Image (cartoon, helix red, strand yellow):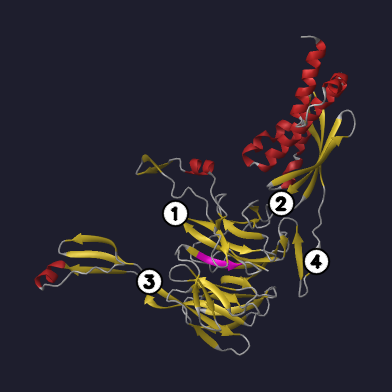
């Protein structure tokens, strides 16, 4: 094989690596050695940049970051300011001169512009310059108030509680202006974004509204046991809340004397809801779990009048329709139920008792829910008529495999190995962005509860706020149909 043939094969191989098509043989033969060298250098320079970007997106590769950097950048730690990176897109890449290759990329979240220069150092192509363009979040007028815009997060403000009955805060979607408002249960922003409705159980059961800046707290009613989940009507004139009324408030122990029943010729009847049934001498024992009934009440904020909503015996966790003032969706006896306050008609939407905390998209076309799935929480969406159900969150198989490894613990001085309590991530309490393009939620996938965000189709799941924004706050989701977030 002569040199000309070897040279042609090398040209074709380089072009294949670059993802292009092979040139005609005559053109390949006319190529110079410098062309081949530059093509190879381009491949190597691009590979160094993509390798570095991959370490930013994938935490498990973080230890390899320095492999792609010159020594000075390793010690200066320029990348520490980037925070969490969930994705990137290369916008352009080209040679600045014979020895320097430049790449411009957009990082997510936040659409931050990153420019990287690559050069050859001891025959290795390494990143030797990093520039992160500063981004200023613009403010846009929404009519009633000004709403902050953050690229990747959209518009508006988030109200959240740290736990059921805990502290309530408000924050811009860009992570700025964190402000403590009050404490209570299940806060929700009014349709105009000016007020928050919530309840408290101490020192008594009570319903409140408060301005978003923490002023003008106003009590509306009290005395309804365990008032929860207050929600606004679409026009802001009414509030619907759930409360406990009737049923069995605490668990009970049942003891049935089977000997006496036999002597009297009576049939031994064990309540169907009994659990932990066991025999103890002449008695059969079992436990009746608490079985409280829940109802819905509506208060007219203009007239102060109350209206009992004739919903099901188990009706809680209501959420108002964003455009229809008389429509609410709530958790019912089996699944989700749509209730019309004007006609009093209940329309079952789902028949799965594992459906919880429904929230309706801003255009009224979809519902997002927390779904109790095999011992953990996941987020599902569906159309308003319950069709086209989709699961948005799921624990990756590699994570499940790691989390299912037996762990060591010592009991009475002896080591034993046990399986983890729950290897799955929990994802719950979804809320739609004002334009319906995103969903914020809480998750414990990092080992602690945090606020995350994703696209409405479940893609691009990532922390909602930059590192450090919520430092000092501890979140807890208890799975009692609490409303953790409200976005307006």
Kindly state the secondary structure of the residue where label 3 is placed. Answer: strand
The image's mark for residue 291 is: 3
Residue sitting farthest toward the top = 1
Kindly state the secondary structure of the residue where label 2 is placed. Answer: loop
Sequence-first disc among 2 and 1: 2
Q: Is residue 31 above or below residue 344?
A: above
Where is residue 33 drawn, in percent x and y?
A: 86, 19
Q: Nearer the viewer, residue 196 or 50?
A: 50
Sequence-first disc among 3 and 2: 2
Q: CA distance from mark 4 to mark 2?
A: 20 Å
Q: CA distance from mark 2 to mark 1?
A: 31 Å
* Stretch of the chain drawn in magenta: 356-360
Q: CA distance from mark 3 to mark 4?
A: 49 Å
Q: CA distance from mark 4 to mark 1?
A: 43 Å
Q: Main secondary structure of the magenta part?
A: strand
Whether residue 149 sits left or right of residue 312 in the image: it is right
The image's mark for residue 374 is: 1
**Location of residue 341 by image quarter:** bottom right
Q: Label 3: few (<14), some or many (≥20) within 10 Å?
A: some
Kindly state the secondary structure of the residue where label 1 is placed. Answer: loop
Q: Which residue is mark 2?
A: 109
Where is residue 211 drawn, in percent x and y?
A: 68, 76
Q: Which residue is mark 4?
A: 140
Residue 60 visible to an observer of this rendering: yes
Q: Nearer the viewer, mark 1 or mark 3?
A: 1
């Amino acid at each position: 094989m002569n040199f000309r043939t070897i040279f042609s094969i090398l040209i074709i191989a380089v072009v294949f690596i670059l993802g292009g098509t092979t040139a005609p043989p005559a053109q390949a033969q006319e190529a110079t050695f410098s062309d081949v060298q530059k093509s190879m250098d381009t491949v190597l320079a691009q590979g160094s940049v993509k390798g570095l970007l991959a370490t930013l997106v994938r935490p498990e590769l973080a230890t390899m970051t320095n492999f792609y950097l010159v020594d000075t950048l390793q010690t200066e730690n320029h990348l520490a300011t980037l925070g969490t990176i969930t994705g990137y897109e290369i916008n352009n890449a080209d040679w600045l001169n014979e020895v320097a290759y430049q790449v411009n990329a957009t990082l997510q979240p936040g659409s931050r512009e990153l420019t990287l220069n690559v050069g050859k150092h001891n025959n290795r192509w390494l990143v030797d310059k990093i520039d992160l363009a500063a981004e200023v979040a613009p403010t846009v007028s929404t009519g009633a108030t000004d709403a902050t815009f953050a690229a990747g997060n959209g518009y508006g403000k988030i109200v959240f509680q740290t736990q059921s009955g805990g502290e309530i805060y408000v924050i811009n979607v860009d992570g700025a202006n964190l402000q403590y408002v009050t404490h209570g249960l299940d806060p929700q922003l009014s349709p105009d974004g000016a007020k928050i409705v919530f309840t408290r159980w101490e020192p008594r059961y009570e319903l409140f509204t408060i301005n978003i800046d923490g002023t003008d707290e106003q009590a509306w009613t009290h005395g309804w046991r365990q008032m929860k989940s207050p929600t606004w009507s679409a026009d802001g004139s009414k509030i619907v809340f759930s409360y406990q009324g009737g049923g069995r408030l605490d668990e009970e122990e049942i003891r049935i004397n089977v000997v006496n029943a036999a002597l009297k010729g009576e049939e031994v009847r064990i309540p169907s809801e009994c659990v932990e049934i066991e025999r103890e001498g002449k008695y059969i024992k079992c436990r009746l779990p608490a079985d409280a009934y829940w109802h819905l009440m509506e208060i007219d904020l203009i007239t102060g009048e109350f209206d009992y909503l004739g919903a099901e015996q188990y009706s809680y966790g209501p959420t108002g329709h964003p455009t229809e003032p008389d429509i609410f969706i709530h958790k019912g006896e089996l699944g989700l139920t749509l209730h019309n306050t004007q006609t009093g008609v209940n329309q079952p939407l789902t028949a799965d008792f594992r459906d919880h905390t429904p929230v309706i998209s801003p255009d009224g076309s979809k519902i997002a829910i927390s779904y109790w799935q095999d011992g953990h929480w996941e987020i599902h969406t569906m159309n308003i008529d319950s069709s086209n159900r989709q699961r948005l969150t799921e624990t990756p198989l590699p994570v499940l495999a790691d989390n299912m490894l037996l762990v060591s613990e010592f009991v009475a001085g002896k080591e034993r190995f046990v399986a983890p309590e729950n290897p799955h991530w929990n994802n719950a309490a979804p809320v739609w962005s004002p334009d319906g393009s995103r969903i914020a939620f809480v998750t414990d996938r990092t080992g602690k509860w945090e606020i995350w965000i994703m696209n409405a189709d479940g893609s691009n799941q990532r922390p909602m706020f930059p590192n450090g924004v919520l430092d000092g706050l501890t979140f807890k989701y208890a799975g009692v149909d609490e409303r953790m977030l409200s976005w307006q």
